[in-house]
Image: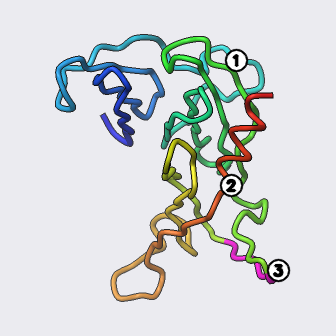
Amino acid sequence: MSNVQIILLTEGQYMLIPRFAAPMISKDGILGPYKIMADKIYKGMQGIPQEKMEDPTIWYSGGLYHLIVNYHGVDTSYHFTSPNGINNWKSRGIAFKKDAEIFKYTNGVVNNWAMVQRMTVYVENGHPTHFLFSVIDVHKGKDKANDNHGSKIVIVPFNGKAFDKYMKK
């Protein structure tokens, strides 16, 4: 297991989403055991890569479970939703692309990063309010000891109330 995300469900169960994005449930606490409930959520979906998908993040808001999964190597992430987090997943298309100026300040300044990975979400009062990204200005393997290329966490504010309202449409 690697690159996992865990979410506490309303029934007191825990859902774990591993790198391969197959929902797993534990009824016995956060330490498990976990039971695989379904195949990877994007299996067979038209227009969605079937390999090299990783770094899932999951949250619940607006009556839906949301999952974003990164397509490794292209740095494009896809958004999926489900009413129950187990099945009936629907592709909502591209969530973001690394090169789409997603780190743009209100004054117009844009930060471009060589690598953008492991997006996570912060939910407050039932709505996502911030997205967090792990970024670095060089590609993997180019970051050496005692250089100035250390990875960083970038926090991006997000209007989750408007997002959830839009998703209900």
Left-right relation of 107 to 76? right
Image quadrant of residue 81?
Answer: top right
Dot 3 amino acid type = Gly
Asked which secondary structure carries label 1, the reply is loop
- Residue at which label 1 appears: 45
Dot 1 amino acid type = Met
- Residue at which label 3 appears: 108
Q: Residues within 10 Å of mark 1 (few under 14, many from 20)?
A: few
Q: CA distance from mark 3 to mark 2?
A: 19 Å
Q: Is residue 73 above or below residue 6?
A: below
Q: Say which residue appears at 59% left-offset and 38% top-offset.
A: 68
Q: Which residues are magenta?
A: 107-112
Dot 2 amino acid type = Asn
Q: Residues within 10 Å of mark 3 (few under 14, many from 20)?
A: few
Mark 2 / mark 1, whichever is N-terminal: 1
Image location (x, y in percent) of residue 5: 39, 39
Mark 3 / mark 2, whichever is N-terminal: 3
